[in-house]
Image (tube, rainbow, N blue to C red):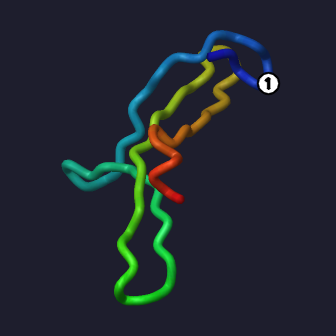
Amino acid sequence: MDCLRCKEEMIKAKLKGDAVGTVVYLTNKKNGIFENEKNSTVSCYVCPKCGYVELNADNAKKLI
């Protein structure tokens, strides 16, 4: 994947939180107690040249 800013090849990185074992994911929960939470894990890419960071939903269709 090329950087949107400088066109350098981006590298895959890990995005971590403060808590041990924390997983970063996107969620889409509609209002209502009977609606299930829909989520997708996230992949992180960083440009080694300019530092631009991009996050992508691994399975965006699961959010629909």
* Vertical placement of residue 48 versus 30, above or below: above
Q: Residue at x 61, y 35 (%)?
A: 54
The N terminus - image quarter: top right
Towards the viewer: 64 or 19: 64
For the image shown, how many numbered marks are present on the structure?
Answer: 1
- Name the residue type under label 1: Arg
Please state the horizontal and vertical placement of residue 23, each as a whole percent of the image. Answer: 31, 49
The residue at 54%/27% (across/down) is: 45
Query: Residue 15's image quarter?
Result: top left
- Circle 1 packing at 10 Å, graded few (<14), some (14-19), many (20+), is few
Is residue 19 left or right of 60 when viewed as pictured? left
Picture residue at 50% right of the left edge, 57% below the top: 63
Measured along the vertical axis of the image, is residue 35 above or below residue 58? below
Residue 51 position, x and y percent, is 64, 26
Q: Which residue is mark 1?
A: 5
Q: Using the image, determine if residue 60 lies above or below residue 30.
A: above
* Label 1 residue SS: loop
Where is 10 relative to 54, above or below? Answer: above
Q: Position of residue 4 (x, y in %)?
A: 76, 25
Residue ID at (62%, 20%): 47
Q: Most extreme residue toward the left, as rendered? A: 20
Q: Left or right? Give the position of 64 relative to 7.
A: left
Direction right: furthest residue: 5
